Structures are given as C-alpha cells and as structure tokens.
Amino acid sequence: MILLDMTIVNVALPLIQEGLDFSESGLTWVVNGYVLTAGGLLLLGGRLADVFGRRRLLLTGVVVFAVSSVVCGAAVAPWMMVAGRFGQGAAEAIAAPASLGLIALLFTDPKERTKALGIWGGLVAVGGTLGYVISGVLTDLTSWRWIFFINVPVALVVFLLLPRMVGESRMVREEDHRLDVTGAITSTAGLIAIVYGLLQAAEHPWGSATVLLPLLAGVCLLLAMLVVERRAKNPLVPLEFFANRTRSVINVASLFFMAAFISYTFMLTLFEQHVLRYSTLQTGLAYLPLAFGIGAGIGIGTALTPRLGVRAVTAAGFIGAGVGLLLTSMVDTDTSYVGGILPGMIVFGVFAGATMPAATTAALHGVTVQDSGLASGVQTTMQQVGGALGLAVLVTLALRYADDEMERGVPAEVAVTSGYVLAFRIGAALMILGGVLIMTLFERVNPELRDPTAEIVEETR
C-alpha cells in the first residue's frame, strides 16, 4: 500500500493537473512532496521504531497514511493535494522501517527469515509496480480520486488485524530512550535539501542557484550530522553502523537500483503515452508482465540464496537487470509492445526480483535488535534518494538530449525517444556497476549458517 502510492500518481498526473488546475511547476510536487518527506524522515522513523516499539509505530504510520490518502482523494485545490502527499511520505517514513524490523524478529529460523524477507521485499516491489496498473485501471474506469481512496480499506484491515497477530517489539533500556534530536534534525534536513536540489535539476541548469544552494546546504548539514553523531551519547546513526562492509555496499547499490528502476518505469510510461499513443488503461496494463516477472524473480532468488549465497545471487540479479534495460533501450518510434518493450521488461523484472530477498538479508547483516529499525531505515532511505536521483538526473539528461536533437532538426518524437534510450542505457550501467561492486566488496553472507537475531529472540523470551 505504501510503496504503491509512490508510483500510482504517475499515470494519472495529467488528469490531476486538469482536475485541480495545477501549474506545470506545481504539479511536480505531487511526486516530490512524497519522495522528499519519505526520504528525509526514514532514518528518524527507524530509530523511533527501535525506541518506542515497532508495532506501535507501524500502526501509527498506517493511520497517518489512511488519513493523508483521504485528504488527497478529497482535494479541491493544489495545496490540499500537496499537503496530503507530504502526509503520505511521513507515514511511509514511520511505518516502513517498523515493518521490516518486525519481520527480522518474528522469524527466528534463518531459512524462514530469508523467505519472509523475500516476501516483504517482493510485496514492496510489486506494490510499486502495480501502482501503474491500478492507476491506469481506476482513472480509466472511475476517477483519479480512487487511486487514493483505495488505501482506506487496506489500512483498516491492517489496523484491526495487526494488534491480534503481532506482539510489541521494543528492546531498548529505559536509560536509552532519549533520542538524538540534533542528529535527527540535521540528517533529515540534509537529506531533504539534497533530494530537493536533485529534483530541481529536472527543471533548472545544474549550475543555477536553485540547484546548487540546496545541494550545498544538504552536504553541510550531513557533515554537521557526522560531527553531532560522533559526540552524541545515544546517536541516531552510530558511525560504527557503517563499519560493516556488506551493509555499506548494499546500501550504495540500492541507490543505483532505485535510480534505474524508478526512472525506467517513469520514462517508459511517458514513451508509451507520448510516442506510442497508449491510453491510461493500456499503459497500466502494459506493466502487468513486470509485476509477474518480479514475483517470479523473488521466488527464484529466495530458493537460490541459501544455496549460492547472498553475494552471488545479488550480483547476478543486478547485472541481469542491467541487461534487461539494455534490451529496452533498443526501442524506437515504430516499436511494438511484444517485440520491443516486453522482452526487456521480463528480463528486467525477473532479475530485479531475484535481488530482493538477498539484498534485504545483506542490509540486515550483523544487525542487533536495537538497530534493526535503523538498518531498514537506512536501506529504504537509500532507495528513496536513489529514486529521486533517477528522476532528477536521468530524466533531466533525457529531456536535454532530446532538446539538443530537435535543435539539430531531428523530428520531435524521434528526438524524445532517443533521450529515453540514453537514460535506459545509463540506468543499465548503474545496475551493472552495482553488481560489480557487490561481487567485489561483499563479505560472505550465508543465511543458512548465520543467525544474527538468535540471541535477541532468546533475550526477548
């Protein structure tokens, strides 16, 4: 439900703009408001889950998400829609780290935990992918408002069932309850400033003050956070957390993954609607093979990870997904869906899905119960920042390349398609680079032989 709403608006953006009278620049906040808030607050959400309880934070996030969805669906003015999207982003920052932290603790057997983490990661990925499908169907058959109202019954079911099925998990001593407020403020503000600057680059030159000032401010704030975290008694993000090489590498690779993934789906949507003239319904349904491919890949990755190891499965998945993007980059203005789009989509989906169980296991490698929420928050933050980077950088490169081509006299549709092709190839390079880093720098992580939470479960009992 949460990740679905990061992508569900894309197909419906033209209808939202028309219905609420958004300006061109204002419309970007329907996407940016969600990404900025979620990416900026995820680290704080992870630590809050560790301190105040994962079930409590998950329930709180679900309620906030439902209320914010109602605000978006009932919006009668642009400010109301943007406010609701900020609320949804904050809800993700609260709920997503808590949910992953609970999964890591509820399943004590290493094999079962690998399956559970694979399902969790798979639902996240499928939810994001199905956003395009559901958006196309609902906007075509009913109204764009139902892409938000559909969250309410889902949230209600979770709110009613979760307290009966899951116990509270809070393994922080009373004297450790104090939060590092200064670290939270500097890290959150720094991430928001950097993501904001990257998103502004989609509309302004890289050397403009609109882009450079927030980027520089974000870097300064993150440097200040490092100083604060080094001196804090109970830091929000202990610097020792990044000493684990496997966790550090997978978080960098996650940034590459989401930069390629989000920009791929975003630009493929534009290509299908603007160049191939697909309707919103056709665009949405065209993503069904991607969802099925991801689901199949998750099953494959879950089965192979205990046998081949986290490093081999994750690296192969990244490289294979890069090959899928290269296949997609063969499209042109006359391409067909079956011969041009579908092959790359299936290859990309299967290999991307195969990485998810192993990548999630790597992100939690060696994590204690006190830091499980933090670990998931760091991973999800990198994914959000990667998605924002992909939209801000790759889309910008595609549009600018298309403008240059048109200035040379190339027909508009051909020029736009060549811009998308360039971005697909850059995304492929990022995926392959991530796979190489994983293969080169990962430690040995075998979920059959290693159980980082066994002593935690015993302590809880």
Image (tube, helix red, strand yellow):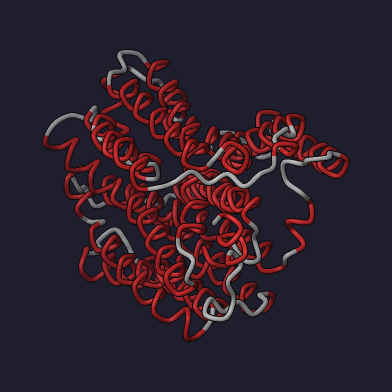
Name the image quarter holding residue 20: top left
The residue depicted at 20 percent of the width and 68 percent of the height is 338
Give how far across and how far down residue 15 sits, in percent. Answer: 26, 29
Q: In this view, does 443 lie to the left or right of 45?
A: right
Number of numbered tags placed on the structure image? 0
The N terminus lies in quadrant: top left
**Farthest residue, direction left:** 141
In the image, 271 versus 449, the foreground residue is 449
Along the horizontal axis of the image, is 29 left or right of 338? Answer: right
Q: Can residue 3 be seen in this view?
A: yes
- Among all residues in the image, which is located at the extreme front? 461
From what the image shows, is residue 425 above or below residue 100?
Answer: below
- Nearest the viewer among 428 and 220 is 220
Task: Please identify the quarter of the rendering in which residue 228 is found.
Answer: top right
Give the vertical position of 202 relative to 395 (above or below). above
Q: Residue at x 20, y 48 (%)?
A: 278
Q: What residue is rendered at 17% in x and 42% in y?
A: 137
Q: Position of residue 378 (x, y in %)?
A: 62, 50
The residue positioned 66% from the left and 34% from the top of the image is 188
Position of 90 compared to 122: left or right?
right
**266 vs 302, nearest the viewer:** 302
Q: Which residue lies furthest to the bottom in this view?
A: 307
Left or right of residue 208, residue 435 in this image: left
The location of residue 232, given as percent across then percent down, is 84, 39
Please state, as top left, top right, bottom left or bottom right, where the C terminus lies in the image: bottom right
Observer able to see residue 35: no
